[in-house]
Image (cartoon, rainbow, N blue to C red):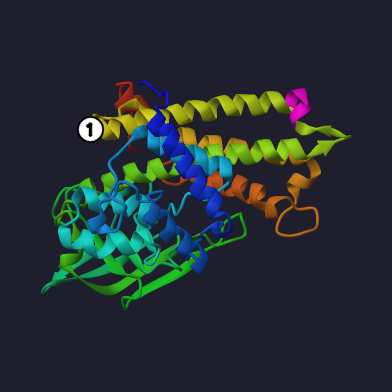
Amino acid sequence: MDLRLTPEMEAFRDEVRTFLANHRDHYAGEAGARPREAALQWQRLLIDNGYAARTIPKAYGGYGAEPDILKTRIIAEEFTRAGAPRGFANQGISMLVPTLLEVGSEDQKKRWIGPTLRGEVVWCQGYSEPGAGSDLASLQTKAVEDGEDFVISGSKIWTSTAAQADMIFCLVRTEPDAAKHDGISYILFPMTTPGIEVRPLKTMTGSAEFNEVFFTDVRVPQSAVVGGRGRGWFVANATLKHERGMLGDPNATEARMHSLIELMKSETVDGERLIDNPVMCDRLMQLQARVMAQKFNGLRLLTSSMTGEPAGMAGLVVKLQGCELNHQIAALAIDALGELGVLYEDGPHLRAKGSWQWNYMFDLGLIIGGGTAQIQKNIIAERGLALPREPKLASV
């Protein structure tokens, strides 16, 4: 691939820089689970100008541009350089929307993609259960047919943003007599449906990012099934593919790396900048090399998506690489802060509002969530390297 920029691409870079300079006062920070109005306005502005939802068809609320690897890279670089948020990345936009584009009905695409892209509808994901986490296909939440509806009973766990969500995309067992991978359906329904109870789960960050969700005779229409009844495992794997991409986003990691470099330029010990400390600088450079590798792997994935070719190993390593790297970047920031790195919650000496400490603990959870690091290594070994499957222990 020739990555040298043509005059047309240089002009496009200038266009992006001009946009960012003209709208610096409109930058909105972290969107949070329920975006505030300033973040919603910024998201709409990004979509209108083609910097978010760029290749999603206009008919579904996107910008409608043709895929272009270099323009995508230029946008990412310029937003990172300016410290500008790239728009929302969440379960609805990053996971459900591409799934609907792949397997959703025309009505589902037109009904849900536009409002989701604009941040008007917040989603949560109903996958894991107390007895079905790593072995997701063993899920027991059931949907019993009753006329044109399903009546859903069961529970989910580790459900991010369930307390704030308007809607859920949920895996339920609709065919009890089918093989465990064949009897599952993927259903969309409102979190305000009678019979749903949400209980927050507080994590070591001190916040309740996750929840338990209980379903007691929750009635939803059968028309809310995505991809066909009993085909939920196929649809779920499409969503999981996009979830891994979201968790291993190289642009987000690169932005975090820039923040770490700025921290190490500004923080000092005995009058010496941390970035000038040989030990700290060596650790920084090692991480920077891995960020660059992740960035170029992202370009490989963009190429695969445009050509329609399988991503292969490049796609399999994304989640493992991204989550572990993000955690290690936060770890270096905490080490660089010294005694200030152990501060938490609030205080006059807290740096970046405690985001490094919060990220360090939250990212440790992401190494487990979305498919543990051990599972990701098994996937890489078996699917990418064609190694034999891990032997199962004999039952006693």
Whether residue 36 is situated above or below residue 327 in the rendered picture: below
At 49% from the left edge and 45% from the top edge, which residue is drawn? 366
- The overriding secondary structure of the stretch rendered in magenta is helix
At 37% from the left edge and 56% from the top edge, which residue is drawn? 48
The magenta span reads 275-279
Image quarter for residue 384? top left
Image check: 7 left or right of 103? Answer: right
At 47% from the left edge and 31% from the top edge, which residue is drawn? 295
Residue 277 part of the magenta-drawn span: yes
Image check: 132 left or right of 337? Answer: left
Rendered location of residue 361, percent (x, y): 60, 48
Report helix, strand or loop for mark 1.
Answer: loop
Confirm whether residue 238 shows in the render: yes
Tell me the amino acid under the disc marked 1.
Gly
Image check: 42 left or right of 234? Answer: right
At 34% from the left edge and 66% from the top edge, which residue is drawn? 167
Label 1 crowding class (10 Å Cα cut-off): few <14, some 14-19, many 20+? few
Q: Residue under circle 1?
A: 308
Residue 93 part of the magenta-drawn span: no
Confirm whether residue 378 shows in the render: no
> From the image, which quarter does the N terminus lie in?
top left
